[in-house]
Amino acid sequence: MHRERVSDNVYWFQSDVYAQVTAGVVVGPKWSVLIDTLALPEETLEIRDFVERQLQTSIRYIINTHYHADHTWGNYFFPDAIIIAHQRCRDLLIERGIPSLEDAKRQNAALRQIDIVLPDITLNNGKMDLRIGKKHLQIMPAPGHSTDGIAILVVEDRVLFAGDAFMPIPYLADGNIEAMRGFYNGLRELTLENIVQGHGEIILRGEVEPSINNNLEYLNTIMKAAKTALRRKAPMDYLAKQDVETCGKSRILLGGLAQTLHEQNLKYAYNLLKKEAEEVA
């Protein structure tokens, strides 16, 4: 697991096991806030050990940016923490998270020790403010990747923990492209120093605007590819030729998962446009 100090009392953690998934900790004088957990128990336990032994504090709150397993299953290892999430996150953990974990336990013995832990505080509108020492955390909606997405802005440092709403390659299979575009455009108004992506490296101040533009251009490109595919006799054959590099991203992103995510994005875009065309007809 990689670890880095982002700003004063703000830390970032990145898995070296699964898809470069990230988590964060904001440290206060008496207690700390954990933003998401990592995919596997041993890495989440490593975060807990660092917070308790190196930082000499404990996790009072966990904020889950969305319900996906690699961001929430580690809740189990903080039994005294109060968990905050969108109301939709709680619903999806019940609907999808619990059965998904049961399936995963049959394949991975390391997961048999854990259970889904549901949020204690839920946000119907995705908004909340939290004070931790001199830090002000502003929780806001972060739609696009999933319907329950939230992001956390460390106001004083202008550091945004964006969850999977911002990734090196946008991922739409469980989300909404227009909501994602709106979220990206809204980021321009926040004058950010850093974006902590849900997966991948930290985006630095000089990279924020180019990264927003690049992701928006990628979304436009896959929609154009899907629109062209609709006019072809063999649309799937056409889409198969639109690899991730053709659409402006690198296949080495996220530990080599970029091409797989890209193919699912193309399928999302094609199905969206096909449905719209059928409704018009």
Image (cartoon, helix red, strand yellow):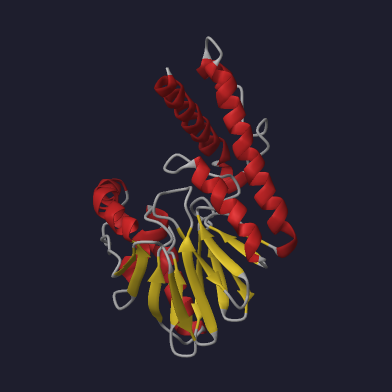
Residue drawn at x 51%, y 50% is 19
**In the image, is 106 to the left or to the right of 215?**
left
* Residue placed furthest toward the right: 206
Residue drawn at x 62%, y 36% is 220
Residue drawn at x 66%, y 40% is 217
Q: Is residue 127 above or below residue 55?
A: above
Does residue 160 appear in this view? yes
- Looking at this view, is 136 or 1 the one in front? 136
Rendering coords of residue 192 (x, y %) = 65, 66
**Quarter of image, res 216:** top right
- Looking at this view, is 175 or 168 the one in front? 175
Rendering coords of residue 18 (x, y %) = 48, 52
**In the image, is 106 to the left or to the right of 271?**
left
Does residue 1 appear in this view? no
Task: Say which quadrant the C terminus sits in.
Answer: top left
Rendering coords of residue 266 (x, y %) = 53, 30
